[in-house]
Image (cartoon, rainbow, N blue to C red):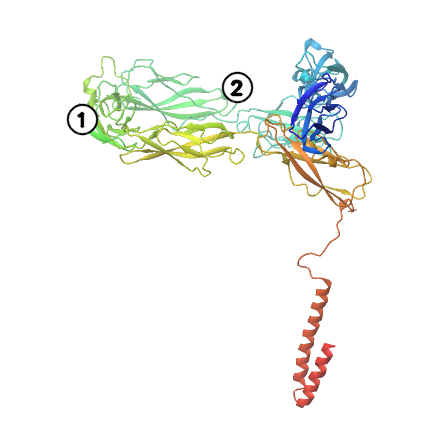
Amino acid sequence: MTFSIFEGQEPSQIVFQFKADPPAVTFELTGETDDIFKIQPDGLLYYVKALDRETRATHNLQIAALDAQGATVEGPVPITIEVKDINDNRPTFLQSKYEGSVRQNSRPGKPFMYVNATDLDDPSTPNGQLFYQIVIQLPKVNDVMYFQINNKTGEISLTLAGSQELDPTKNPSYNLVVSVKDMGGQNENSFSDTASVDILVKENIWKAPDPVEVVENSTDTHPIKITQVRWNEAGAKYFLLDRENLPVFPFSIDHEGDIYVTQPLDREQKDSYVFYAVAKDENDKILALPVEIRVNVKDVNDNPPACPSPVTIFEVQENEGLGSSIGIFTAYDMDEKNTVNSVLKYQIVHQDPQIPTDGLFLIEEYEGKFQLARQSLKKQDSPQYNLTVEVSDKDFKTLCFVQINVIDINDQIPIFEKSDYGSLTVPEDIAVGTTILTIQATDADEPFTGSSKILYRIIEGDSEGRLEVDTDPQTNAGYVKIKEPLDFETAPISTIVFKAENPEPLVAGITYNESSLASLELIVTDVNEAPVFSQPVFEAEVSEDVETGTKVGNVTAWDPEGLKVSYSLLGDTRHWLTINSATGEIFSAARLDRETEKVYRVQVVATEEGGSSLSSRSSFHLTLTDVNDNPPRLAKEYTGLFFCHPLTTLGSLVFEATDDDQKPFRGHQFTFALGSTSFEKDWEISKINGTHARLTTKHTNFEERVHRVLIRINDGGQPPMEATVPLPVTFCSCVENSCFQPAGHQDGMPTVGMAVGILLTTFLVIGIILACVFIRIKKDKSKNGVENAQASEVQHLRS
């Protein structure tokens, strides 16, 4: 059992009433009582002194029920008393006065010093959460704060205003009063402390130079110095940073910080450059933010005017009045805009043909606007005029060509060849893009002009926009096509009305009439279609600990023909779900586990009942939310932890815990304790943060072997999960600070006896081979001699 008690409460408080069945007559309390916790014979557990979390945060007790002879009848049962923190400690700065310095124009938000305070209260509760703030800044110019502090870490940095406005010639130093509060600074009962901070402002000469202007196409000898940068101290190394990744970067910098242009520049290729100078120390570490270098390329008039196209074509109707605008002719110049180098003038220098007279057209000198200068045009005089236009800037001239076509006026409307195209039957699954009908209208205006071109438009019967009409530019035929899928259930019969129109406006007094209209009866036949889901993906979210049989979501589909739909699942590889075939409701069919699969994805099949039994699919995604159902464990296998034996001083080592549940927003907050009181004489454990703890020896008298220390880890979740895990620690002889272990016999390696046996066998085989050779050499001797020789040789080998 676990009980939580706030520290500092009045003593003689009852914790719990324990009971036991006969023959138990009394209770015994052991463990970390610290003479604070007592138990009466009737099982009433209480404490007689106020608790102090900073002295002991957890009391591990054991309660046993005893009979009249003092023998244990039941238990001992482990009891954990968690001492909950109250805000009874004041935060304290480590120093009463801090000193620091900052460079003028330093980067805003980059810390240049910090202050630090401590609080003995529980850092995992608001009581121990510290909040820093600047109370006073002296001097405070125009009521603007130049300094800021990270309210959690105590890091001091410049504000944006401070980075821009700090000036050692005006105020060489500043004084800050900094406060720290506990309770996260959000409670009026927070404790606080203050400290003084003196800050010296140093001058910064690392500044961006003024923008540089370089004349394009310079013929001077390169490289040419154009500007410079300097770091605050000597010894800096300078680099240029081209963030545009130019194919050729035409600038360089030397060891003094002087910047050069290395080749002639062309403003028409690039009119400005922005790059950066970087200063680094001897370790190639950047000393400050890069400074920006701007180079503008100054224009010279080195480009003649250019025509917009080889021939510019305009159209004018033959009945246009005097002064009518025909079009605007616009040439261009690659030189810098809005300067004398790019100001262009226009003049017509030739007209062909000069019928019925020369000078029929006028062009505005600077705007390039073409107008009729003398009279209206007639196509029978000339259907086309070719003009030569001179375009000039202050140094160059260019000739451009303009063609003006005289077009017929639009005084004829399109007329359909027939007004009724009858009935047309198509299935509803006809492919999009299919041409279902060709319609035809004619226009008596001049062919291949805007007056005779015909555009077809559907004005009735297709509000859904399922049809479209494309016009053949050569024949003016209209091709009626399927633009969107047809739907028998929505529109089985439609009366389509087409209208034929010209892109060119009709002249005054002429209007479209019924001759420009035609109709079609479109009949759509039914095709059996598969069921349709209401959405392509269905999503739901449930807790991973829901009971089997819980509804977790549902899907919906319908059949366009009105048939009933049945549902089934595909891809339910873990057999976690089941679906009601009639309603589409989805239920859990087994225990769910977020740690196995956070988002469980299956497919749902909807099948029409009867008909062709067509089916369609959708996806169902089930997101599992976490519950605390995994006990803590060590973050890795700690097999290499050792201390050199014999231990000369107290030693410690750090280990990490984790668990398989979802990481909390504030991170894991594990608590650590020794797994048994038997380890307390040798070890102690202390928490470093929410995931790490330190195991420390209490003495130096350990045996040279592997000690398996049991660690109890609690995750503090809801409900809390706890595990006791072994942490192996080896005490061993060391060589050069490494654990030395004598090498034993290794599998696969021969013993000394085996090696000797192998060697003797090898010699024996060699001897036999030599004997055979000797026998062959002596083969002419008598048989007895051979036998004696063999006997002698064998005897020798055996010896």
* Mark 2 surroundings within 10 Å by alpha-carbon count, few (fewer than 14), some (14 through 19), many (20 or more): few
Q: Looking at the rendering, which quadrant does residue 749 occupy?
A: bottom right
Answer whether residue 295 is visible to the viewer in this image: yes
Using the image as rendered, state which of residue 557 and residue 251 is in the foreground: 557
Three-letter amino acid code of the residue under disc 2: Thr
* Residue 655, image x, y percentages: 69, 36
Q: CA distance from mark 1 to mark 2?
A: 64 Å
* Residue 339 numbered tag: 2
Q: Secondary structure at mark 1?
A: strand
Q: Secondary structure at mark 2?
A: loop
Q: Is residue 441 left or right of residue 82?
A: left
Hey, which residue is sitting farthest right in the picture?
648
User: Residue shown at 79%/42% (left/top)?
Assistant: 702
* Mark 1 surroundings within 10 Å by alpha-carbon count, few (fewer than 14), some (14 through 19), many (20 or more): some
Q: Is residue 437 above or below residue 190?
A: below
Using the image as rendered, state which of residue 42 and residue 768 is in the foreground: 42
Judged by depth in the image, the label closer to the viewer, 1 or 2, is: 1
Three-letter amino acid code of the residue under disc 1: Tyr
* Residue 421 numbered tag: 1
* Residue 388, image x, y percentages: 38, 24
Pointers 1 and 2 in contact (C-beta within 8 Å) = no
Using the image as rendered, state which of residue 120 and residue 766 is in the foreground: 120
Q: Looking at the rendering, which quadrant does residue 178 occupy?
A: top right
Q: Is residue 474 left or right of residue 659?
A: left
Report the quarter where the N terminus lies.
Answer: top right
* Residue 223 numbered tag: none
* Residue 270, image x, y percentages: 55, 28
The tag earlier along the polypeptide, 1 or 2, is: 2
